[in-house]
Image (cartoon, rainbow, N blue to C red):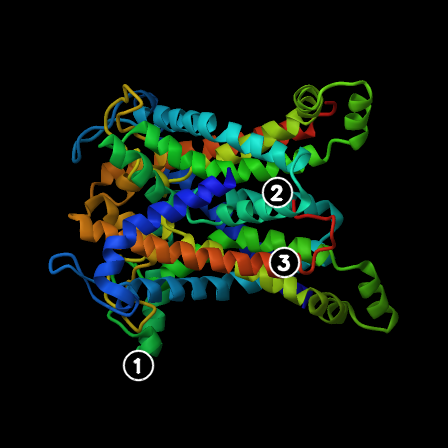
Amino acid sequence: MSALAVLCALLVVLPLILVFFHLLKMGFSSLNWNFFTKLPKPAGEEGGGMANAIVGTIELMGLALVMGVPIGILGGIYLSEYGSEKTNSWIRFGADVLNGVPSIVWGLVGYALAVMPMQGYSAFSGGLALAFIMIPMVLRTTEEVLVLVPNAYREAAMALGIPRWKITTNIILRTAFKGLVTGVLLSLGRVAGETAPILFTALGSSDWNHSLKEPIAALPIQIYYYAISPFEDQNRQAWAGALVLILLVFLLSASVRFISSRRGK
Amino acid sequence: MIGVCFLCVAYVLIKGAWLAMTHFGWSFLTNQHWNPVTENFGALPFIIGTLSSAAIALLIAVPLSIGTAIFLTDLAPVWMRQPLTSVIEMLAAVPSVIWGLWGLFVLMPWLHDHVYTWIYKQFSHFPLFGGPIEGSGACTMSAGIIVAIMILPIVTSVSREILRSVPDLQREAAYGLGATRWEVTRIAVLSYARRGLMGAAVLGLGRALGETMAVTMVIGNSPTIHASLLQPGWTLASVIANQFGEASDDLMRSTLYEIGLVLVAVTILVNIGALILIRSIETPGSRRA
């Protein structure tokens, strides 16, 4: 019987190993200087790279961060420091439910809220859709981290006469800073790989992005389009792009692990 | 803030779907046609596709996940537990589109060559495995398998938390009564944790329902309802991804919004059910990490 359990564990690990193996095998050889610096070539032509997609992903992550993290952190602060027990449990429940909303729905929301009024696809709307995904995640992780700050800190600060808001910013946030950063990085890692929400908000493009109002390329979108394209050269580039993407995501996860394992505040 | 997000989703989806909803009424959910030219839209193929791929995914993933969770909590040597958990977390970090890419170029051809053709030869008289099968391997079963891989991490980690929260007293009592190791696990742990494990499975279901990119790359994107699992299909999420950019007019776009509404409603209901099941077994004060 326990042999079955071992088999299960092995089967679970197997896909990860396979995926890595294939990513490296098919993608590594395409990672050259061109890939990182050139723009995509028109369909059918060989060569070209994904420079704009790599930059675009980073840019979208930054946008989502700016739009989503403050709201998420503020919400988490509210949950842990203020608010009544009853409303808080509803807010928590709501956040958990929102966490489960399929990402493509956020794409629809972003489309309706940003693309239609702005009459065009834009980096801004892509960032908005991604921010929507980040907000519940950051909210929950922020709250969990802030709750861990010992009450003694709060009480000592209050005894010293420090105003409530200052307690929150100077003492609690400082103590929990590492955890907050961890939560943000985790949600960034999730958002970096999201395709569906940006498919019809940021749209993707084959050129550099020059303003927030223009469409912007991103790694996941580029991988998707190249993967389903009939041109083998583009398929090959899709593998390379996927390798870059997964390295990015794992870099973020690794930094999370690194930060949380360091001792001290 | 959360309220605002909720409102956004509800408002957008309902407003967007209004046109389609008023046009089609409830029959939208049972209509099986999808014809953008004649504007005859129905959601039934996608509902069936979503349900069948999710069912396959659950059938594959839940036993594997619970088995792995048992391994992690009871059977694995202590030095192995953290690395294995990290590996499973890494599985969760892989973006959906990469699973789709791998599924498209690696898994599907392999499945087609080694699995589907064999199943087809043996069982093609059985409608669930009828044909003709696509040469590329794109079918509902492929989608189910890929989604199974994607929900493995979350079902495993939630199951593990549930199994860990079973009080040691239960296990010790069973040992005291002379149960073997497996009997201890089966009787003392699993029956205690049954509701929570169901919750983990339902959580996986919620995730499976909404999976978009990987599915759209391996399911074949065909709006016809086939009885066979070995034939292409379409799911609620993947049809939106596929068609929204090409929606030619307001009615089609509104239809896609309505599909999104159906998807969100179902997902939210499923997730609420899962959360209730899981929370019912957790001790107050230990919230899921």
Question: Relative to B49, is B67 on the left or the right?
Answer: right
Q: Amino acid at mark 2?
A: Ser
For the N terminus of chain A, the quadrant is bottom right
Q: Which mark is drawn over residue B278? A: 3
Using the image, tell me which numbered label, if any, was put on residue B125: 1
Task: State the CA–CA distance, disc 2 to disc 1.
Answer: 44 Å
Give the numbered dot on residue B86.
2
Task: State how far apart marks 1 and 3 are (Cα).
Answer: 41 Å
Residue at position x 62%, y 65% in the image: A4
Measured as percent of width and height from the top left, residue A143 is found at 63, 36
Disc 1 is placed on an element classified as: loop
The residue lying toward the viewer, choosing from B280 and A15, is B280
For mark 2, name the chain: B
Q: Which badge, 1 or 3, comes first in the chain's sequence? A: 1
Quadrant location of residue B164?
bottom right
Query: Which image quarter: residue A76?
Result: top right
**Type of amino acid at the residue the image marks with label 1:** His
What secondary structure is marked by label 2?
A: helix
Nearest the viewer among A232 and B173 is B173
Q: Is residue B123 above or below residue B202?
A: below
Whether residues under marks 2 and 3 lie with C-beta atoms below 8 angstroms apart, the answer is no
Examine the rendered structure and indicate whether residue B237 appears above or below residue B89.
below
For label 3, the SS is: helix
Quadrant for the C terminus of chain A in the image: top right
At label 3, counting other C-alpha atoms closer than 10 Å, the crowd grade (few under 14, some 14-19, many 20 or more) is many
